[in-house]
Amino acid sequence: MKKFHKFAAILLLLPTLLLVLSACTGGKTGENDPEAGGNADAPEAKAAAITLPYYENDSKNPYFASSALNRALASLICEPLYRVDASYAAHGVLADSLSADGLTRTVTLKSATFSDGSAVTAADVVYSFEKAKASAWYGARLAPIASAAARGGSVVFTLSEAVPFAENLLTFPVVRRGSAEAAESYVTGSGAYVLTADGLSENLQKAGGALSVALLHIKNPENLKNALEIGNIDYLFTDFSDGEYTRIVAKNTFVTMNHLVYLGINHTSGALQSAAVRTAIYYAADKDAAATAGYRGTAVACGLPFHPAFCAAQSLTSGVTAADSTRADEILNRVGYNRYDKQGKRTNGQNTLQMTILVNNDNNFRLTAAYNLAENLNAVGFSVTVEGVAYEEYARRIAAGEFSLYLGETKLPENLSLSAFFTGELSVGMQAELPVFAEYAAFCRGERTAAQFSESFLDDMPFVPICYRAGMAAYTGTVQPDFSTAAYDIYGDITLWKAAE
């Protein structure tokens, strides 16, 4: 992945406070369990190059693991059909080619071998898909894919709806049929390592080049930061999901995630029925300040809903991130909001620009950003207050449409689909008859370009994109991680990691 200060993405930040990485057989010691990490007495064991943490009380089977930490082991022991890079372009790993026909995607497989020497077949991929589809974590990612069927050396995936870049969703771990039946199963994959009761060992079916990896059992998630700082582990990723900035004494790099922060708008609420008023909000909002001050620099501002590093949108120049109060004022004057009522609120004679930003007050980043945005809007004549409530009440009111504005965040899937806003739960309060809804559906079918959809988005302004959140990768001087992959995979391609020189 590319570094945050260059505004690129990404390491996958899974919905957890902290994630950690690094590794080899016969690992480091600390306050954690000496049973973890490989058999240091085995004659074939190698000295640890990097050390990776895991939870002993959670499954190591990727389809049963409940923690992001243990799910992340999958990329070490398994390979996917596709791996997505930092620009969200998919590259075949086990997939050789893909053909599309309506709602079907046919993936032809490469010749590959599992760690036990058996061939990777289409039946194995279908088995893995069905296990992933039934799991809580991968199931959400695979929701748009209805089924998979083996056809010779190919797998035919049938979509339940048109989605953009469907191959980006085919990142689930592929395992040998029958090896993932129970939570205690040690799955058989084709990745760089083999998972055993003793830890990790090299997959002898693969070419060399990967670092040696040790596993270290972490009993308490609160110990992860300390484990890195004292050198018991070599890599830690925190996604700041609790709304608090965590300082770690180690080398670190900020990386942008596929977590979109946005200002939701209730199109049925008074003045907000007007696309012009919604557009004035867009120009008044200082997205740069929300990212830097509100999120303390752990975000990248965006003027369009697309991820800043998205390969399909990198050539787009429309969209602004800095506040343009002059343009916002001009828009409001042009559509008749050029006077004030007796309470001093800007009005067109029928509606006033009085509204509230609903926000989850359990998240300091989001709360601070909401106050910043309210200040931006008030500077051009809106009368905006912030209402902070507990998360349960916040979620209930949004679902019920009981808001005028709200500051929200959603983790987009690995194909960066915006369908949640146009056909899903985040469409609450929006006017489905707006042209942008049809334009997005056409974009998903491949009938519109990103530029064409963006033009329609800016015309109708269904919601206001603010920023994409970032997390922080911290690591010791032992290892130089590779940041070339996208956020769905914490470790990325482990074979590209290097020992620090």
Image (tube, grey):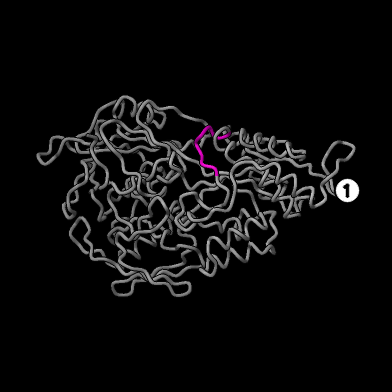
Q: Which residues are magenta?
A: 294-301
Q: Please, which residue is most extreme toward the left here?
A: 43
Residue bearing the label numbered 1 = 349
The residue shown at (69%, 62%) is 434
Q: Position of residue 255 (x, y in %)?
A: 43, 41
Q: Is residue 414 visible in this depiction of the protein?
A: yes
Question: Where does the C terminus fall, quadrant-wise?
Answer: top left
Q: Is residue 56 visible in this depiction of the protein?
A: no
Q: Position of residue 483 (x, y in %)?
A: 35, 44
Identify the secondary structure beneath mark 1: loop
The residue shown at (25%, 38%) is 23
- Three-letter code, disc 1: Gly
Q: Is residue 295 on the magenta stretch? A: yes
The residue shown at (46%, 64%) is 145
Q: Is residue 30 on the magenta stretch? A: no
Q: Please, which residue is most extreme toward the right here?
A: 342
Closer to us: 436 or 236: 436
Image position of 227 with respect to 435: above or below: above
Closer to us: 63 or 206: 206
Left or right of residue 272: residue 106: left
Q: Position of residue 106 (x, y in %)?
A: 38, 71
Residue 165: quarter of image: bottom left
Residue 438: quarter of image: bottom right
The residue shown at (32%, 55%) is 180
Crowding at mark 1 (Cα within 10 Å: few <14, some 14-19, many 20+): few
Image position of 56 with respect to 327: above or below: above
Q: Position of residue 497 (x, y in %)?
A: 27, 43
Question: Where does the N terminus fall, quadrant-wise?
Answer: top left
- Across the whole image, how many numbered discs are drawn on residues? 1
Left or right of residue 75: residue 260: right
